Image (tube, rainbow, N blue to C red):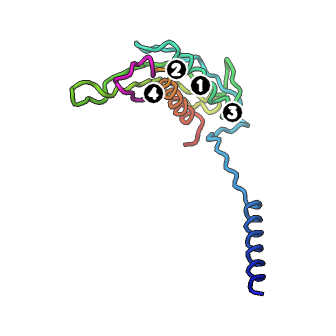
Amino acid sequence: MVWKAKRHLSDLLLCMMLFLLSACSIKYQLTGTSINYDVIKSIQIDKVPNRAPYGWAPMESMFNNKLQDIYANQTRLRLVKRGGDLHISGEITAYDQYNKAVSANGFASQVQLRITVNIRFQNNKTNQSWEKQFSATTQYDSSQQLATVQERLVTEMIADLTDQIFNATVADW
């Protein structure tokens, strides 16, 4: 009799747990934007030219593509060539590398790479506008040639830069 009661109790607990797991679901959605889509419907993103004294040729197109992609993928804004409710323009102003760390033998052991962009933003519906600089940095081992790690490092820094710009323009962070 005790065995049947224990079995009945364990079956009941199992059924309750299954019910709770199936009844309770958590849906978490983070769009990260604070856009009023009733007012703001479009965005104009001008080509951001590379005006850095030193640069890597593919960097400009990589940056421009990623900047447009982040707004296209994370908002419902229409990308327009002119007259957008929001307007982003700017230029890549620096692409620098410098020694970050020195080893015991006196030579550089780490090199830091940095991209800086100057961005102008205007919300044509609220007349809000600003101009800011954004920078992203990364390091690589000095035993490596920049040419062998450059694409990966620039891709990482561009992702960081476009996230910063996105957050500054349309996210409520």
- Which mark, residue 133? 4
Whether residue 27 is situated above or below residue 164 in the rendered picture: below
- Which mark, residue 90? 2
Any magenta on residue 137?
yes
Please state, as top left, top right, bottom left or bottom right, where the C terminus lies in the image.
top right
Whether residue 8 is situated above or below residue 101 in the rendered picture: below
Left-right relation of 35 to 166: right
| The one of 68 and 106 positioned closer to us in this rendering | 106
Q: Type of residue at label 3?
A: Ile
- In front: label 2 or label 1: 1
Q: Residues within 10 Å of mark 4 (few under 14, many from 20)?
A: some
Please state the horizontal and vertical placement of residue 117, each as a whole percent of the image.
47, 23
Q: What residue is shown with label 1? A: 66
- In front: label 3 or label 2: 2
Distance from disc 2 to disc 1, alpha carbons, whole Å, reads: 14 Å
Residue extent of the magenta highlight? 132-149
Distance from disc 1 to disc 3, alpha carbons, whole Å, reads: 21 Å
Q: Residues within 10 Å of mark 3 (few under 14, many from 20)?
A: some
Q: What residue is shown with label 3? A: 40
